[in-house]
Image (cartoon, coloured by chain):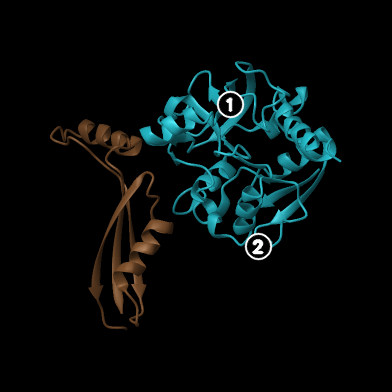
Amino acid sequence: MNFAVIVFPGSNCDTDMYHAIKDELGMDVEYVWHDETDLSRFDGILLPGGFSYGDYLRTGAIANFSNVMSEVVKAANAGKPVLGVCNGFQILLEAGLLPGAMRRNESLKFICKQEDLIVENDTTMFSGLYEKGERITVPVAHGEGNYYCDQETLEELKANNQIVFTYASNPNGSVEDIAGITNKSGNVLGMMPHPERAVDELLGSNDGLKLFQSIVKSWRERYVAAT
Amino acid sequence: MYKVKVYVTLRESVLDPQGKAVMGSLHKMGQSEVEDVRIGKYLELTLQKGDYDLDAKITAMCSKLLSNPVIEDYRYEVEEVVAQ
């Protein structure tokens, strides 16, 4: 598989993401600058964390108007896996690829620590190698990770099984302890915790690696096994 | 020229933790009459006059970029100004 790590001015988890894919997952990966106008050569799109455009106006709001975003939308509509982590999640929300919005953490503090997550859905292309109900440890690092959506949207998320990860102990005030959600068709995942920072025991946890391995597994089943 | 003043606020149904913290400080100052504080954003846009629908243009800018309709409301005022 060939992955793109989209780099915006102010992205700061791009190197972590690149390392996770190249060295731990063992797949091809390229950094792609935000003014790129063609992502067709990639099988998976990764939007890393950071502070794109200094979080001016709202987190992710300015990045959403980058050239590359229309290509990200195209890839999402084509069914390719699109993963947004932290600021990447915020950008996917601003782009309307995922429902809801982010608010400041309830405590108003920037939270940077390991969190236990519960795998709520093990049938997505991002979570196939986990077990439903499994507890995994993945770090969070954000000031605006307090997920919000209205009641109607929440009912829809539940009905369509779009909630993939929840916090075991909610750190930021998110609605329903939500840590990560997919779009309706399940190929776009946004999550505040950083799986790319949990890919080796040396980092304190390797629970995040299975997320990337799940993407590869589902891709192989779809494209390699069929040929 | 038009000067457009845009006020962006969190929707009433959305909790405002910043506002709550500021209210706490106001109470500590002794301003016990303060019942609620909501923090928002204020933007000033200067637009050239032209052959366009001003309200439609402002609405497009406000709903697509300047505010996020999921959690925010906006209102605006328009003032005609002479170019300097």
| Chain identifier, colour cyan | A
Element class at badge 1: strand
Do circles 1 and 2 both sit on a common chain? yes
Which of the 4 image quarters holds residue B63?
A: bottom left
**Nearer-the-camera pick, A34 or B26:** A34
Give the answer, above or below, for where A48 lies relative to A7. above
Chain designation of label 1: A
Q: Earlier in the sequence, mark 1 or mark 2?
A: 2
Colour chain B appears in: brown
Q: Give the labeled residue for mark 2.
A: A35
Residue A105 visible in image: no
Within 10 angstroms of label 2, few (less than 14), some, or many (20 or more) residues?
few
Tell me if A11 is positioned left or right of A43 in this view.
left
Which of the 4 image quarters holds residue A114?
A: top right
Element class at badge 2: loop
List x then y, in percent, for residue B56.
Answer: 33, 68
Looking at the rendered image, the disc whose residue lies closer to the viewer, 1 or 2, is 2
Identified at 64% across, 20% down, the residue is: A136
Tell me if A177 is positioned left or right of B19 in this view.
right
Give the answer, above or below, for where B52 lies relative to A33. below
Give the answer, above or below, for where A210 lies relative to A14. above
**Which amino acid lies under the numbered mark 2 shown in the image of this protein?**
Asp
CA gap between label 1 and label 2 equals 33 Å
Within 10 angstroms of label 1, few (less than 14), some, or many (20 or more) residues?
few
List x then y, in percent, for residue B55.
Answer: 29, 68
Q: Give the labeled residue for mark 1.
A: A113
Tell me if B46 is positioned left or right of A171 in this view.
left
List x then y, in percent, for residue A143.
Answer: 49, 37
Identified at 58% across, 30% down, the residue is: A140
Identified at 27% across, 83% down, the residue is: B82
